[in-house]
Image (spheres, rainbow, N blue to C red):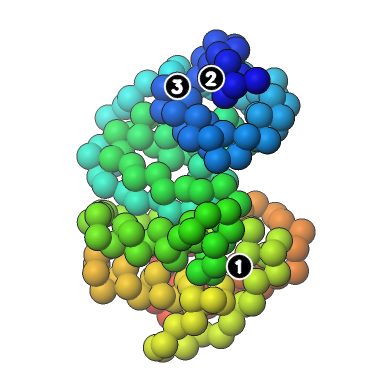
Amino acid sequence: MSNETFLIPIRQNNDLSDIALNELRMDLDEHALHQRYYTDIAYLAGNSRKYSLNSVQTVASPLIGKKILFLGSSVTFGFGALGESFVDYLWKRDGVAAIKDAENGTTLVDEDTYKTNDSYVARFREELTESQPDVFVLQLSTNDANQNKKLGKITNQNFDTKTITGALEYMISTAQARWKCPILIYTNPYFANPLYKQMVERVHELAQKCQLRQV
């Protein structure tokens, strides 16, 4: 089945927004087998029409017009929510000028997963030339834990972006120097993986070292 034909009933049944439709279209162009996954989750209660982005009303918010860069993978993308993640809700409800830089399945460490330069670090480098955000929000990816990437050590220079810690420190220090904006790192809910537990603990350490905010 073509991607366009596949998306027709999902758009109609789930009242999918144009933004999410375009994101799913791009994802399916690169990962055709995701059709099966989207078919399964389209009928979950949490993806019903009443939760559609189209039903969200904009409110008076102190975030209106704030340019926020969200760098992440599937959670930031909204993989389990048909492309409508919390980023899209902040855009619609609070008027955030959101930059949603999300690639499903990718890692913090600077190694390609599906295509050239799809890691967090590689995409971050691209954003350096294009963005000047008011806030930088970074997802602590579970993919690094699932793929058993090296945790690495905290250092003050020569960050090894082939390790989780080095990738984090590189992006944090560079963003602080270049953008001079608040940086938020958000972690996933409970995730039964010992390495991810170490990653969360490492973020706590980096938060103290670099004066970050954690969610």
Q: Which of pointers 1 and 2 lies earlier in the amino acid sequence?
A: 2
> What's the residue type where badge 1 is placed?
Val
Asked if the residue under mark 3 is in contact with the one under mark 2, i.e. CB atoms within 8 Å, the reply is no
Image quarter of residue 57:
top left
Residue named by callout 1: 200
Within-10-Å neighbours for mark 3: few <14, some 14–19, many 20+:
some
User: How far apart are the alpha carbons under marks 3 and 1?
Assistant: 33 Å
Q: Secondary structure at mark 2?
A: helix
Q: Position of residue 31 (x, y in %)?
A: 60, 39
Q: Position of residue 53 (x, y in %)?
A: 46, 24
Please tell me which residue lies in front, 31 or 212: 31
Task: Judge whether 58 appears above or below 207 on screen.
Answer: above
**Residue 208 visible in this rendered orientation of the protein:** no
- Closer to us: mark 2 or mark 3? 2
> What's the residue type where badge 3 is placed?
Ser
Q: Position of residue 173 (x, y in %)?
A: 35, 75
Within-10-Å neighbours for mark 1: few <14, some 14–19, many 20+:
some
> What's the residue type where badge 2 is placed?
Glu
Q: Residue at x 40, y 69 (%)?
A: 171
**Residue 21 visible in this rendered orientation of the protein:** yes
Q: Residue at x 62, y 77 (%)?
A: 151
Q: Residue at x 51, y 48 (%)?
A: 103
Task: Judge whether 40 appears above or below 61 on screen.
Answer: above
Q: Secondary structure at mark 1?
A: helix
User: How far apart are the alpha carbons under marks 2 and 3?
Assistant: 15 Å
Q: Which mark is residue 4?
A: 2
Residue named by callout 3: 17
